[in-house]
Amino acid sequence: MAKKKSATPDSTKAATALVVLVIVVLVAAYAVLSGGPVAVGSAGVSENITANGFPFILNGTEYMAYFGGRIGNGGASIQIVKMPSFINPTISVLLYNSTVHLNLTGRYADIEFNPVKVYNSSALVKIKAVPESLKVQPDSEYIKISGPYGFGTNSNSTTTVKAVSSTTTASTTTSTVSSAPTTSVSANDTLAKINGLLATDSDYLLIENYTTLYSNTYECTPGMYNSTYFKIYGSYPSGQFTYQNVSNIVPYGIVSKQENLGYGIYEENYQTKSGIGTLEFASIYINTTADSLINSTIFGANYSVLYSAELRAHSIGNACGIYIAGV
């Protein structure tokens, strides 16, 4: 069912949605005008990458590569993002005078970038797929992860702590968060009704479990992460899976904002906090007049993927679990 909003639109959300729409349209238009994304295979392709972007496909997944600018010693920064670009993080590859191996999908390198010529506003690069069966280690020192391409932290966002105490059935995790008491009886009744309806939603229970998993990551040290990773995979992490990169992108918390949309309809909006900024995570719409949930949406991932990662994180058994689970 479609989300219901009040008659008065939220100008900030509308502006954000418009920017996202413009970016999606521009990327789609470029892909059409350029003949669509290029499949990168073992033979490789040579491309003069500019700020307009170069769409390519690796192992069935579409990416965009952008020229990020010149760097010292005649090098260039190439920024790679999995589509859609406004959701997924940006992987920056620092190219100097030698080939850089990168792991876009797995533990081992699956693609390489070889700089041919760097210009003021572009870089000619030879891009080639690398079979993971070769077990080539990524060049970690030349790989950095940042936020979604073209987006920064939403510093104007206002958040409040959830007023809820719940025990989930999806796992053994229990999360309890409280807020300042309120003196309004009607407000308390409405809040109790909202919490009661939320407790029946599987997405909400999953969000609560992730709140706990993310908040525990402050106890995950580089040593714990490396030793746990080695225990599971038999090798130490590299490339985009190093502690520095993973700890920067995996959230350390989830915050929520409740909005009264009118006519008894409320929105619970959830955002993740991480080293790359504040990102939209989920929204749940509640109709307190009809005592029902209207709709719940988790952005950028589906329930089954998140639930499987949650179970895997718990099975790993320490504070680094959600880092290694890959979400």
Image (cartoon, helix red, strand yellow):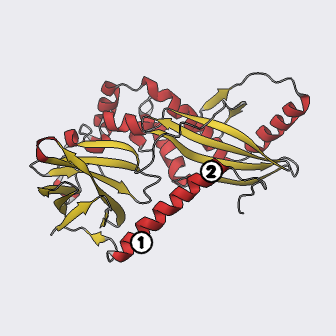
The x, y position of residue 66, in whole percent, is 30, 57
Q: Residue at x 42, y 39 (%)?
A: 276
Report if residue 199 is visible in the image: no
Report if residue 212 is visible in the image: yes
In the figure, residue 141 lies in which quadrant?
top left
Spot the residue most to the front.
120
In the figure, residue 184 lies in which quadrant?
top right
Give the vertical position of 12 relative to 243 (above or below): below
Q: Which mark is residue 29?
A: 1
Quote the CA–CA distance across marks 1 and 2.
24 Å
Say what amino acid the circle numbered 1 marks: Ala
Question: Is residue 52 shown left or right of residue 158?
Answer: left
Q: Which mark is residue 113?
A: none
Spot the residue most to the right.
185
The x, y position of residue 242, in whole percent, is 29, 37
Question: Is residue 160 shown left or right of residue 308?
Answer: right
> Which tag, 1 or 2, sits closer to the chain's start?
2
Mark 2, Cα crowd under 10 Å, few <14 / some 14-19 / many 20+, is few
Label 2: state its secondary structure.
helix
Residue to which mark 2 is pinned: 13
The x, y position of residue 9, in whole percent, is 71, 53
Give the vertical position of 199 relative to 61 (above or below): above
Give the vertical position of 164 relative to 85 (above or below): above
Q: Residue at x 41, y 39 (%)?
A: 249
Image quadrant in which the C terminus is located: top left
Q: Residue at x 32, y 33 (%)?
A: 244
Say what amino acid the circle numbered 2 marks: Lys
Q: Residue at x 50, y 27 (%)?
A: 216
Label 1: state its secondary structure.
helix
Mark 1, Cα crowd under 10 Å, few <14 / some 14-19 / many 20+, is few
